[in-house]
Amino acid sequence: MSTTPESRRWSVAAACAALVALVAGAALTGWVLTRPDDTAGDGLAALRTPAATTSAPPPTPEATPSVRATPRATEATAAAPRPVRLRIPDLGVDASVRPVGVQRDGGMVIPAEPTSVGWYRYGRAPADPLGHTVIAGHVATREDGPGALAPLAGAEEGMRVEVLDADGVRHRYVVRGRENIRKKALPVDEIFAREGRPLLVLVTCGGEYLPELRSHRDNVVVTAEPAG
């Protein structure tokens, strides 16, 4: 996703490319060498229902590592209060959430500020009874270093997640899975599902850093379900 003068919006792909300046640091190199397992708990495939992929928007995975989606606003999405803050206490995540759409190339817009993450506003909101609420953020930027979702690589089953919406309602979730998914194989239809059980899906870059591509190999996808 490209940077604009107005908001410095980048795509997840651009955030990955920006990491080339950080990989030289000892801390990030150490993380690459000792990164967590590729999966933890149940992933998207285990949590989805047959209906979950029937009404998803029609984004198509590309060779690039960006998260791609086609905007299709619905009445349900418009009526539900938008998320404004994301917290994962066990990981130290506390980020403001901004509604975002797509750029001309179909890439999901991501706020450039490291303390902010983007909510896909053409998808579902936390108060919607069906479908996935998708929030994505940078793992790092060249100017600001690690992003708000950099700790997602350490997400474990059972961790608590909280999303505050614009009406002041706190939506509580429990992490059920974390997957490192090859970017070329990212299951976009599942991630942006509009039907099926309500889930929160968090996405950032992760996995092995590939210097020749100036990009990480994978996307880290964390799936959480509403707390009972």
Image (spheres, rainbow, N blue to C red):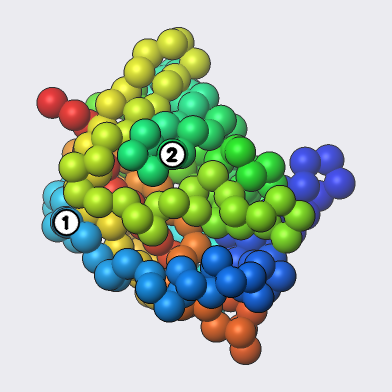
Task: Check disc 2 and report the residue beneath it.
Answer: 92
Residue 51: x and y in percent read 18, 48
Under tag 1, what secondary structure?
A: loop
Note whether 60 is above or below 160 in the view shown.
Answer: below
Task: Check disc 1 and report the residue beneath it.
Answer: 42
Q: Quadrant of the C terminus?
A: top left
Direction front: furthest residue:
26
The amino acid on which the numbered mark 2 sits, given as a three-letter code, is Gly
Classify 10 Å Cα crowding around label 2: few (below 14), some (14-19), many (20 and above). few
Residue 151: x and y in percent read 44, 51
- In the rendered structure, the answer to whether residue 192 lies left or right of residue 15 reads left
Q: Is residue 43 in view? A: no
| Quadrant of res 145 | bottom right
Q: Residue at x 42, y 32 (%)?
A: 87
Q: Quadrant of the N terminus?
A: bottom right
The amino acid on which the numbered mark 1 sits, given as a three-letter code, is Asp
Instruction: Name the residue nearer the viewer: 213 or 121.
Output: 213
| Quadrant of res 162 | top left
Residue 74: x and y in percent read 44, 31
Residue 198: x and y in percent read 25, 36
Classify 10 Å Cα crowding around label 1: few (below 14), some (14-19), many (20 and above). some
- In the rendered structure, the answer to whether residue 144 lies left or right of residue 163 reads right
Note whether 115 is above or below 212 in the view shown.
Answer: above
Note whether 137 is above or below 198 in the view shown.
Answer: below
The residues bearing labels 2 and 1 have C-alpha atoms spaced at a distance of 22 Å
Q: Residue at x 62, y 89 (%)?
A: 212
Note whether 22 is above or below 133 in the view shown.
Answer: below
